Amino acid sequence: MREWTIDTWVLYKVDEGNFDALDFLLAVLRHHKVVFDHERHIEQEYQRCLKRTRNRYLEEWFKRLIARQARVFYSGRLPNRHERALLRMNFDCSDLPFVGVAHRSKDKLLVSEDSDYTQQVCDYLQQQLQVKVLSLPRALEIAENIQDP
């Protein structure tokens, strides 16, 4: 059972009809856990997405995630030096809590293809914080392989 940090970008992709995104969320719901921050920034972003999209699959996914007790919580705060370095790379400050929890999580897996996750940012996250930023196809492949490596 892995701990996944899932950028809101993935939820919006489900709403756009991306089947890999839906498959990924369902695989996570069945076999894994989703990481949230104690400060509730991630949950608030998810709630905004649910309100905007009114997507019943996303709403049901979120309800079942809670019912299954498949959420884990960490602080979303990053050390100042990492926060400053990411912001210098034009990283979106609203994504900082996702990086913060991914860094503290057991598996350090963050799923997003959002435009602020540039190659430079992804390299920094991997080298400085050991956070792996995964594309949707790669994340789906890992999530469906439920045997531990």
Image (spheres, rainbow, N blue to C red):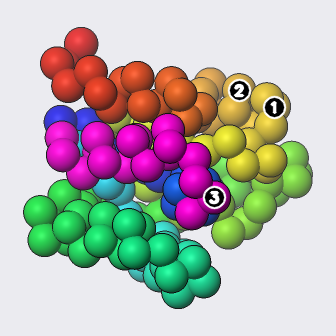
Q: Which mark is residue 120?
A: 1
Q: What stretch is highlighted in magenta?
A: 15-31
Q: Is mark 2 on a helix, strand or loop?
A: helix
Which element carries disc 3, helix, strand or loop? Answer: loop
Mark toward the viewer: 3 or 1: 3
Residue located beneath label 2 in the image: 123
7 falls in the magenta region: no
What whole-number distance in Å separates the C-alpha atoms at marks 3 and 2?
28 Å
* Residue located at (38% from left, 67% from top): 57
Q: Look at mark 3 in the image and give the residue it sits on.
A: 16
- Within 10 angstroms of label 3, few (less than 14), some, or many (20 or more) residues? few
Q: Residue 65 location in percent, x, y?
A: 23, 64
Mark 3 vs mark 2: give the one in front. 3
Badge 2 vs badge 1, beta-carbon distance below 8 Å: yes
Amino acid found under the numbered disc labelled 1:
Gln
The quarter of the picture where the N terminus appears is: top left
